[in-house]
Amino acid sequence: MTTRVEVEDLLRKLAPQILGALVRRYGNFDLSEDAVQEALLAAAVQWPEQGIPENPRGWLITVAVRRLADEVRSVQARRRREEAVAAQVPSDELVVAAPSDERLPSEEDDTLTLLFLSSHPSLSPASQLALTLRAVGGLTTAEIARAFLVPEATIAQRISRAKQTIKASGIPFRLPPEPERAARLRVVLHVLYLMFNEGYTASTGPDLQRSELTAEAIRLTREVRRLLPEDGEVTGLLALMLLTDARRAARTRADGSLVPLTEQNRKLWNQGCIGEGRALVTDALTQSPLGPYQLQAAIAAVHDEAACAEETDWPQILALYELLERISPNPMVTLNHAVAVAMVQGPQAGLDLLAALDDDPRVAGHHRLDAVRAHLLELAGDRAAARASYRRAARRATSLPERRYLEARAARLKDAQ
Amino acid sequence: MKYIALVYSNPGAFEALSQTERDELMTKADAYLKEFSDSGELLSGGVALADPSTGKTVRVRNGVPAITDGPFAEAKEQLAGYYLLDCESLVRATEIVTHDPAALFWAVEVRPIMDTGGSEM
């Protein structure tokens, strides 16, 4: 008996290999991707009932090649009907041979090549996410639409727009040349980070289903690490995801409301994830040049290591934020840095650091700035100002659980007065 | 981020337009819908509302429902329809809406939709 979950796991693992094999052989990313998607759908329906075939990879390739051949034939027929210049396309290039050659090219390279292609900088972030989930993750358009809470037609549009862009710009199916590779890898990692965040921040109450994005982001980042074990930032990102996801069970209450880090029940934290994340980040920090994901993972590790909030090693967190601010300055880092400063040097020092952000258009008017200021004012004992700041933050928040949390903080200060 | 675009117009505003203006509005509206649906930013499922005079307003006070004709008649501009956008930022949302012909003739309000997810602080 084969379960649906077993089939899905296998299909997601095989998806980029099948697509890579087709694109390498036939060169048409656009049509190959559609054909692979159809083969995956067929397998998802048949395998749970009829069992997984002896050679699942060969089965998928055969079905996908057949679909591709059908599609190519119909494209050719359409061309002839429209009396287009069919002669420009030598038909033997389009006619698809049976997959007799089982010596398929290195699947590892294909997964990576597909990731680079799906997160090509010429695509919009929304298209990068959708295409990565489908072409590399093997998710269906319907599954992606459910995860992002948008109509299926919208995801289909984003994928088709992405494929048109790839086709039109003639982006080749190979790893980016060495000089570009490091910068392009940063984009791949950013897409995986966005995927993780989308799932993680949504995994409350009725949106539990979206946590699938978190699992998928971790799985794909593991893949990248398997292929690029030497890259400290890949390892750092995987560690960051694991160390963050470890707290998932503690971060919300049964009613979906958010629990701040200091009040979380640390017994609910996943020690397996924490252990793995810590080992990864230690490994990366000792063996690779420093990078922002490694530093964020190191900060998450320090939080996760404290048995209770009071035992948090704030001086170490502060030192890590100082480094992070130096190599990757941005206002969101400064916000967290200000909290660390307040915990080590007192709330006023943190508030002084925040004052610099009031003129920064990237964060001025953002509810997080008001929320951090409110928190530091509360620590400083200025309850009236803290309450006003929490209320301002609540008004500016565009997330329901965050707004409720901020309103509750404001109300608590009022009750105590 | 998801945003809602609320189209406000005076009741009877469409009838008040000249034939040329109406044709212009319809052509531009089709082009607008196509362009931003294709970009994956304008979500399907937008609606146009019937004239405010065909609606009712419901209030329940002390358990007693009171149903009155139409929305507030005194308001000059009334909600005429809405659609959803899913895009990078409010800046991008307003940039998209500047292409909506409804904004050319009337007014379109863009408001963020509350996210049901969030980060602990």
Image (cartoon, rainbow, N blue to C red):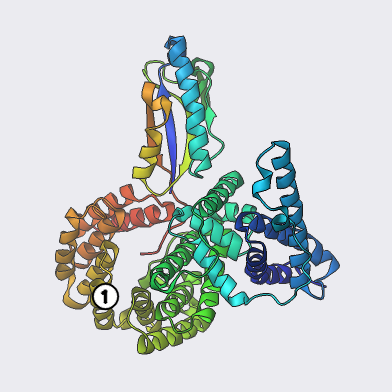
Q: Is residue B109 left or right of residue A90?
A: left
Depth order, front residue of A170/A117: A170
Q: Is residue A360 visible?
A: yes
Residue at the right extreme, as displayed: A50
Secondary structure, mark 1, is helix
Q: Where residue B83 sits in the image (x, y, percent)?
A: 49, 35
Depth order, front residue of A129/A72: A72
Disc 1 packing (10 Å; few <14; some 14–19; many ≥20) = many
Based on the displayed image, in which of its 4 quarters is residue A103 positioned? Answer: bottom right
Compared with A411, A214 (above or below) is below
Compared with A35, A196 (above or below) is below
Q: Quadrant of the N terminus of chain A?
A: bottom right
Q: Residue at x 20, y 73 (%)?
A: A341
Q: Quadrant of the C terminus of chain A?
A: bottom left
Q: Is residue B56 left or right of residue A143?
A: left
Q: Where residue A379 sits in the image (x, y, percent)?
A: 22, 67
Q: Residue at x 80, y 66 (%)?
A: A47
Disc 1: which residue: A321
Q: Residue at x 37, y 44 (%)?
A: B92
Q: Where residue A116 sits in the image (x, y, percent)?
A: 50, 66
Q: Where residue A300 sits in the image (x, y, percent)?
A: 38, 77
Q: Is residue B81 left or right of residue A102?
A: left
Q: Is residue B61 visible?
A: no
Q: Residue at x 73, y 69 (%)?
A: A7
Depth order, front residue of A351/B32: B32
Amino acid beneath label 1: Tyr
Compared with A218, A273 (above or below) is below
Count of number-bearing discs: 1
Q: To which chain does the residue with label 1 belong?
A: A
